[in-house]
Every structure is written in C-alpha cells, then in structure tokens.
Amino acid sequence: MLQIPYIRENRDLIIERFTKRNLEAIETIDEILELDEQRKGTQQSMDNDLAESNKLAKQIGELYKSGKAVEANELKEQTKLLKEKSSEEKTKLHEIEEAQINLLYQLPNVPNEIVPNGNSDADNKILSEHGEACTFDFDAAPHWDLAKQYGLIDFEVGVKIAGAGFPVYLGKGAKLQRALINFFLDEAENAGYGEVIPPLVVNEASGYGTGQLPDKEGQMYHVGEDDLYLIPTAEVPITNIYRNVILKESDFPIKKSGYTPCFRREAGSYGKDVRGLNRLHQFDKVEIIQITHPSKSYEALDHMVDHIKGLLNKLGLQYRVLLLCGGDLGFTAAITYDFEVYSAAQNRWLEVSSVSNVETFQANRLKLRFKNKEGKIELAHTLNGSALALPRIMAALLENNQVEDGIKIPEELVPYTKFDKID
RNA sequence: GGAGAGGUGGCCGAGUGGCUUAAGGCGUGCGCUUGGAAAGUGUAUAUACAGGAAACUGUAUCGGGGGUUCGAAUCCCUUCCUCUCCGCCA
C-alpha cells in the first residue's frame, strides 16, 4: 500500500510509472488525494469541537465541586450541541477513511524506473543465461514419465486422496525432495539467513499485511470454520513476524529463511502448463526474506540474486535470469527478477524463483518501521525470494540428468541424498 | 467441546466516574557522583493524525467497535484474543 504523503508529492511520477503496468490510475489517485483533503478538513473541525467540549467538561466539573449547579447546567446546554456536531464529524471521518483505504488497496506498488514496459511474460527482459545445454543421444523423457518409471512420484494416487495437483512422492523421489530442502536451508544458513519454521496457516490480518488480501483472496485456500488461510508462500507468515514492530537501525539487515509447503488454488489455470510437476496446488519451497534500511534494499536484492545463482550453479542446471516487465510484475513488487531453468525434455524454461524488492509497500500495511538516527519513525523495506521452489527444480533435475539406465544426482546433492543415482 | 479468569506504556503492575497530565517498579537513553566500575542520584523515555520553520500545541488511543454521561481505563452492550482447569488427543 502506498503512503498518502508519497502519493501527494509524486502524483505525476506514480501515474507515469503505472503505465508500465498498463494501469490507468489517474482517477483513483486524484480521488484518493481529494478524499485526503476532506479527511484533513473534517478532522480539524472535529478536533476543535472535541477540544472545546473537553474544556467545558472540565469547567462543569469544577462548578459542581464548588456547588454552582445552575451555572453548570447552563454549560451543559452548550456541550450538547458540540457533541452532536462532533459525532457527525466522526461518522463522516470514518466514511472518508474507509473510502480512501478501499481505493488504496486497489493500487499496486510503483514499478522501479528500470522495469521494462510490457504486457506479458513475452516482454520480460532476459538479462543473462548460465550453464550448458544438455544433449542426449537417446529420446529424453519428460519428468512425469521418469517419475513413473522409477517410482518417484505418484500423481494418480494424489488425485485419489486429495485431487489433481497434490502429488505423492515416494522412495528416492521423497528422499531427493528432502535432500533439496536440506541443501537449500543449509545454503541459506551459510549466507546468513536465520532459519524459521512458521505456521502454515495465517489469519486475515496477516493476509492483509503482506498484500494477499483483499485482492488475491481467491488464490488462497480458506479454512472457513476457523477463518484461516493456508499460506501460498512462507513470505506471508515470516514477514508478518514483523507486523506492528518498530525496529532499531542496528537490527538491520534482518535475514530469515524458511522451508514450508505452499498452497495455491491456481483457480482458472488449466491446460498443458499444468502437467506433472509444472503447476501444483501444494508444493515445497525454501524462501528467503530480508528486512532492510530503505537505503540498503537494492544492495540486498543483488545479494539475494547472487545467492540464487549460486544454488543453481551448484545444482548444475542451465538457467537464465529475467527482469520482469510491468505487465508481469506482481501486485506488491517494485521490481522482480525471475529465474528459469531449462527443462531438456519439455524444451521449455520453467520458473523456479522470483526475487522481489517490495520497498515500503508491505511495510506500510504491516506497520513495520524503524527509528532512524534522528529518532524519527520510518518504514522499512521488505524483500523476498524463492531459494528455491522445489517442483520445477525436481522436474529439471530428473529430465536433464537422465541417462539411459537411470538418473544421476548432482555432486553437491549426494551428501544429502546419500545415493548418487536413481535406477 | 464444558467451566472459570483475564486483556492497562518496551516489560511488570496499581487504578470502582472528575484529585490520572495513567501511581509505583523494571528496562533503556543522557547527566551527576567515582581513580575505574558497582551502588547511589537527577532527568528523560509511546504511537497516529492535524497545525507550526521550529520550540511546541490540539485530538485520539488502557485489545477492537458501539453506547450511557457535561465528563469513562473505570459503568453498559458487542466482538476478538490470551491464560487456567476438565474432556479429547500426537
């Protein structure tokens, strides 16, 4: 959520930047600013009336004490009018504030200057490519066939016990999954991210805090009985640890990592992209988050990008880094880098990580602030990134490392799997 | 699920309608004291909005919302949360 003073001072810039998202926001923004003027005026007259009324109440108290009941009753008449007026103003103020916040909830984050224009993923900018392409002297099989052949993942039994998009990992498939989680967690630990195991459900306030609510309500599983949401990413519970917190400057940077299953309804996404592990309702992910001083967040973003590159290098996967265009940028992000690995059998790139600087967008909703050197309260910056999402890594590892009689495990993973080949 | 007790500042905790501008304590910041430290001692120490160049001022906030009253931390209604005991249970 954008801050009103920021909108007031940067109206034209924001409108221009929103065109990167193909968003025509001029009306909404001007309405927000107009409502803010109304809010100020209303609050001023309400405050004045309340101040007057407080003064009278004190006088009345003193008059009663000194036994001057008649004069006290005269003053009471005056307060009646003030009370009516101020309570009307209070109602009006609430209406204005509600209208204003509803508009604010509609506005996404302002894209960073370097975010390219564009409508869809076709307009994302490819920044770099790494690793070598796999070549096979046999017909490479897609991961769903390999998973079946070697008994690693059972999609059908997942359908039976839960539904499509809830695979069951078996044997070495399960072990490989667990190995990857441990590998990612250890790497995060080595990079200074403190490990967290958060709740897998969050309440409504947390959903609002990180920006999943109110606009992406349909993407989360909702436990109606208890009014809780299954987390779509560990970013939600971990970042919400810092909701309503005022940090000291010396607390920066805060670096946390967490492994959690993630739950996404993926309403409305069907078709060929959903085959196998490509798109699931439940998947595992190790997330890294940072909370930084505003002046340090882009430096932190670079470090997070480097961390993810390191993971993919160690796994020996061919990958590329993209700078998302405005049209593909998530609601809360000011800038996002995506990482895609090449799936040799499907002959396509698969997104395995998304790293974003959210700047103050979440911090404003979370009331995540810090006291600066002058003793003033400021909003912190939040960042998050997947490091990494498991299913597509698993898919690429299976496909890219297949040999005629099995699947080789990358060297870095062998200490975790305790086997170097699936056959 | 049943029964009960509670939600007050960074923390503990007093506070049954105006003497609260929230006592007292702890913690923390800055002084004084000291050869140095401890102890002692003085002082400061919430957030939001508005006005102001600033000092500062006004308003709101004692879990949230609403009400009674000239006046509410205190009384009433409502809602959320926490804790204890019982039941169930890894």
Image (cartoon, rainbow, N blue to C red):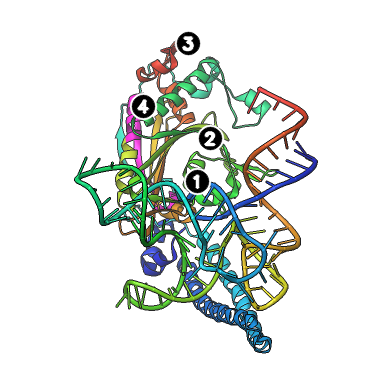
The disc labelled 2 sits on which kind of residue?
Answer: Arg
Gap between marks 2 and 4 measured at Cα: 20 Å
Contact, CB < 8 Å: mark 1 with mark 4? no
Please tell me the numbered disc located at residue A317.
4
Determine the chain carrying the residue at label 4: A
Q: Residues within 10 Å of mark 1 (few under 14, many from 20)?
A: many
The disc labelled 1 sits on which kind of residue?
Answer: Asn
Q: Which residue is mark 1?
A: A240
Q: Earlier in the sequence, mark 1 or mark 4?
A: 1
Q: Which residue is mark 3?
A: A423
Q: Are marks 2 and 4 on the same chain?
A: yes
Q: Residues within 10 Å of mark 2 (few under 14, many from 20)?
A: some
Contact, CB < 8 Å: mark 3 with mark 2? no
Gap between marks 3 and 2 measured at Cα: 26 Å
Q: Is residue B83 above or below residue B53?
A: above
Mark 1 element type: helix
Task: Give the residues drawn in magenta, as a range.
Answer: A307-330
The disc labelled 3 sits on which kind of residue?
Answer: Asp
Mark 2 element type: loop
Gap between marks 1 and 2 measured at Cα: 26 Å
Please tell me the numbered disc located at residue A279.
2
Q: Residues within 10 Å of mark 3 (few under 14, many from 20)?
A: some
Gap between marks 1 and 4 measured at Cα: 33 Å
Q: Are marks 1 and 4 on the same chain?
A: yes
Mark 4 element type: loop
